[in-house]
Image: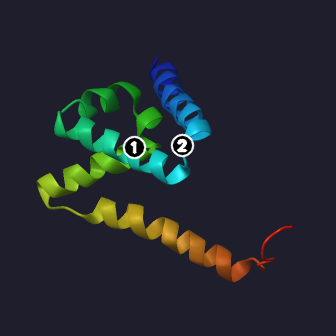
């Protein structure tokens, strides 16, 4: 049953993201999902959702926002360092390995 809940909650978050992406730019959407995670953690609603959906919510930007608040509450910033450094490292490796082509016309 955990897989069903993870699929439903993760799918609903993805559906909301896709529908909002049609109307808004990506930067606004990322900010909204981070703030949703911050709000859920600040109101203590994130833990029940996480225990219900596990990976369905942990693989989204909502989890990053909730982790930011958890880091501020506990003083343990190791998760935040991972969330910020991993995409930067992947972007750097991609830039070194791949040959840039410039803009496509």
Q: Residues within 10 Å of mark 2 (few under 14, many from 20)?
A: few
Q: Horizontal placement of 56 versus 44: left or right?
A: right
Q: Position of residue 40 (x, y in %)?
A: 26, 35
Q: Quadrant of residue 50?
A: top left
Q: Considering only order in the chain, which callout, 1 or 2, is on the residue closer to the N terminus? A: 2
SS for callout 2: loop
Q: Residue at x 81, y 77 (%)?
A: 101
Q: Residue at x 33, y 39 (%)?
A: 36
Q: Quadrant of residue 52?
A: top left
Q: Which residue is mark 2?
A: 24
In this rendering, which labeled residue sits more in front, label 2 or label 1? 2
Locate the C terminus by quadrant: bottom right
Task: Work out whether residue 32 or residue 75 is closer to the camera in this orientation and state it.
Answer: 32
Q: Position of residue 84 (x, y in %)?
A: 40, 66
SS for callout 1: helix
Residue 94 position (above or below residue 29): below
Q: Horizontal placement of 13 versus 91: left or right?
A: left
Question: Count the marks: how many?
Answer: 2
- Seen as rendered, the residue at the extreme right is 105
Q: Horizontal placement of 88 versus 63: left or right?
A: right
Residue 87 position (above or below residue 37): below
Q: CA distance from mark 2 to mark 1?
A: 11 Å
Q: Residue at x 40, y 28 (%)?
A: 53
Q: Position of residue 81 (x, y in %)?
A: 34, 67
Q: Which residue is mark 1?
A: 32
Residue 45 position (above or below residue 83): above
Q: Quadrant of residue 62?
A: top left
Q: Position of residue 85 (x, y in %)?
A: 43, 70
Are circles 2 and 1 on residues that touch, CB within 8 Å?
A: yes
Q: Residue at x 47, y 67 (%)?
A: 86
């Amino acid at each position: 049953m955990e897989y069903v809940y993870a699929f439903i909650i993760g799918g609903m978050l993805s559906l909301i993201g896709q529908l909002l992406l049609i109307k808004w730019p990506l930067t606004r959407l990322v900010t909204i999902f981070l703030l949703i995670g911050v709000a859920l953690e600040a109101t203590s609603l994130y833990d029940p959702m996480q225990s219900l959906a596990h990976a369905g919510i942990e693989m989204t930007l909502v989890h990053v926002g909730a982790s930011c608040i958890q880091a501020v509450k506990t003083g343990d910033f190791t998760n935040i360092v991972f969330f910020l450094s991993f995409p930067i490292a992947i972007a750097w490796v991609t830039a070194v390995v791949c040959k840039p082509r410039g803009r496509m016309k």
